[in-house]
Image: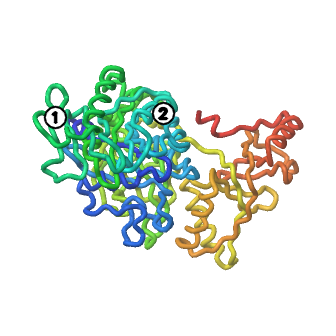
Amino acid sequence: MKKIKDQVLSRRTFAIISHPDAGKTTLTEQLLLFGGAIRDAGTVKGKKTGKFATSDWMEIEKQRGISVTSSVMQFDYDGFRVNILDTPGHQDFSEDTYRTLTAVDSAVMIIDSAKGIEEQTLKLFKVCRMRGIPIFTFINKMDREGKAPLELLAELEEVLGIESYPMNWPIGMGKQFLGIYDRHHKRIEQFRVEQEEKFISLNSEGEIPGEHRLKESPLYEQTLEEIMLLDEAGNEFSTERVRDGELIPVFFGSALTNFGVQTFLESYLEFAPMPQARNSTIGKIDPTSEEFSGFIFKIQANMNPAHRDRIAFLRICSGKFDRGMNVTLPRTGKSIKITQSTQFMADDRSTVDEAVAGDIIGLYDPGTYQIGDTLVSGKELFQYERLPQFTPELFVRVTAKNVMKQKHFHKGIQQLVQEGAIQLFKTVKTEEYLLGAVGQLQFEVFEHRMRNEYNVEVYMEGLGSKIARWIENEDINDNLSNSRSLLVHDRYEKKAFLFENDFALRWFQDKNPDIKLFNPMDINQ
């Protein structure tokens, strides 16, 4: 039991969140370098060299240089086992990102020093606050011209409404970037110098002792003044407030040049929370308890196109996983023996025999699991909290261009819909297939994957934005369906209306007061 507890205490599981192009995937690559998980970091935009970011495994990601799925990577560093979830930055994939945030204990937020807080960063931050997830911030691209550090700090506190504490402070910026003043480790880390000159220890006054060429730069004096200002007027550091999500530690650096990343990683591991107790239908579940439990937060088809497989991503919440163990799926009451389990290094997978609370593992899924499913090994059956189900806003009518490919068409739709990024509907009267999504890019990825993974060309007719509302009382007259209030079945055979606009929704409710409509997002608040 003590061994399991020690293993759980060593786990650090976090998601990296940011606006697109802030440097999220690049930072992930550098962290993997330190963990020895990879030997050579491939930048996201390195298409001409043939190098691609390790966490971007899907073909469309390599072509576009964006992350559209959440990748999972694991490595060991300094006695810790680190699980990183690299999330999609693009807002069209916010649903995948939000679900991923349910599976972590902390988040790392990357901010572009030139752009500050961007729209998608703010949305994701709000989700973290809502879930009480501690946040660490890495202000990236300090080797380029950007906003003044004090301005960035003020923006962080004002826009996000949370106090911050700079763990280090930049000495200059852009072409004049000389390094960072590390407040936590009481040292200066120099930029672009030989390894033996990289760190300069500071004296008790927080200054470089003796003579040093860095002291000749006016930027050094300016930095000392700013540090004095932070010491006197800034927030106090508190480990407890960081872990309660009330204080954000801030780090400055450059992911592309791998500067400040190791300092960030070591400080993060020191202050980030271990796996936390999670709410369930029988109360909070202690991660160090003996009984194994976890939940499925993501399902991904065709991670290995050669085998047409499906992987369910499981966050272990308590106890220890052993390959071959029997678990129960409380939703169905069925017992399952888990013999095929994997751990991830982006698309590289290896069989995992053991894992503990905090780890993310992949389970081979023959169609057994749904997103949000809980798995337990003990006799007491319970469910973890529901995962957010998003209400789609954009809709298309979809058909196979080649009627001879109907079998592949249906298989592809069923598998991709189970991943949760798109939702499937059938019109009640004509049984046409409609797809719903949060953003347009999801449809493009669906079309690309149907062609490349299932060898099916699809035709999609845009239906524009609709307001989807489900029906509480299922017994309903199908003749109420029309072009402005389209009656459909979802994939679970539950009935819903797709309304043309707000006016159509209000008109319908006025005319049919006995029909109770609801939005699934309201249930998940």
Residue occupying image coordinates x 37% and y 39%: 317
Residue occupying image coordinates x 37% and y 55%: 26
Residue occupying image coordinates x 52% and y 35%: 126
- Report the amino acid beneath label 2: Glu
- Report the amino acid beneath label 1: Ile
Secondary structure category for the residue under label 2? helix
Residue 15 picture location, percent across and down: 41, 45
Snapshot quadrant of residue 396:
bottom right
| Foreground of the two, 256 or 505 | 256
Residue occupying image coordinates x 60% and y 58%: 441
Q: For the residues marked 2 and 1, what is the alpha-carbon distance in whole angstroms? A: 30 Å
Can I make out residue 314 in this image? yes
Can I make out residue 289 in this image? no
Q: Which mark is residue 155?
A: 2
Q: In this view, does 441 lie to the left or right of 240?
A: right
| Residue highlighted by disc 1 | 208
Seen as rendered, the residue at the extreme top is: 232
| Foreground of the two, 165 or 73 | 165
Q: In this view, does 476 lie to the left or right of 413?
A: right
